[in-house]
Image (spheres, grey):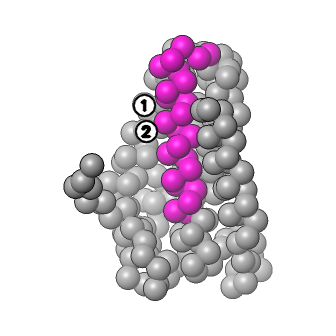
Amino acid sequence: MMKRSILISGGLLVLAAAGISQEGASKDDARSVSGLDAITVREAGMDMSVIVFRSMGDAIKAGSDAKDQTFAAAGLVKWAKAVPHLFPAGTGKGETSTATQALPTIWKDRAGFEHAAAYYAETTARLAALAAANDTLGFAKQLEVVNQACGACHATYKQPVPPHHGN
């Protein structure tokens, strides 16, 4: 079931990325996306990365070897490299008709945001290396480092989500 969730999440991300319009991207930066497509892809990707991350943690807690998480960890590495390109100017909170939790701080402190994104990429690359080496203890510890990298970035660059009151 967990492997199925990871595969479905990865497939959805690939489909979302395939549908990105490249209109408006400069000739110098073919890796960028623009407007509402960027918001859709980054939000879907963030959701799916949470699913993959939690699945890996659950698998390790259940006694899985780190090597069994190699594919999922490699997917997070690819995602981490894409993240900074999914925040083009004009896609922050209040700048589009689409709701987003991306705070203006991303564009006001672009160097800080790029640094946080690079750190996330470094932490996921280390996670993937530990999975490939089948270092289960190191992998489990690195999951927490990746989680902290996510939390630190979100604390500065993402609008907090109010707690859900209900069942």
49 left or right of 132 in image: left
Query: Which residue is label 1 attached to?
Result: 144
120 or 52: nearer the viewer: 52
Residue lying at 43% horizontally and 43% vertically, measured from the top left: 149
Specify the quadrant of the image occupied by residue 36. bottom right
Residue 35 percent location from the top left of the image: 58, 80
Q: Is residue 48 visible?
A: yes
Residue 12 percent location from the top left of the image: 67, 55
Are the residues tagged 2 and 1 within 8 Å (C-beta)?
A: yes
Specify the quadrant of the image occupied by residue 14. bottom right
- In the rendered image, the residue lying farthest to the front is 167
Residue 114 percent location from the top left of the image: 51, 59
Q: Is residue 119 visible?
A: no
| Location of residue 33 with respect to 47 vertically, above or below | below
109 left or right of 48 in image: left
Residue 113 percent location from the top left of the image: 45, 60
Query: Which residue is label 2 attached to?
Result: 147
- Magenta stretch contains residue 49: yes
Q: Amino acid at mark 2?
A: Asn
Q: Main secondary structure of the magenta part?
A: helix
Q: Amino acid at mark 1?
A: Glu
Magenta segment = 42-65
Residue 162 is tagged as none
Bin the neighbour count of mark 2 within 10 Å (Cα to Cα): few under 14, some 14-19, many 20 and up.
Answer: some
- Magenta stretch contains residue 103: no
Residue lying at 43% horizontally and 59% vertically, measured from the top left: 112
| Location of residue 138 with respect to 54 vertically, above or below | above
Quadrant position of the N terminus in the picture? top right
| Location of residue 20 with respect to 77 vertically, above or below | below
120 left or right of 23 in image: left
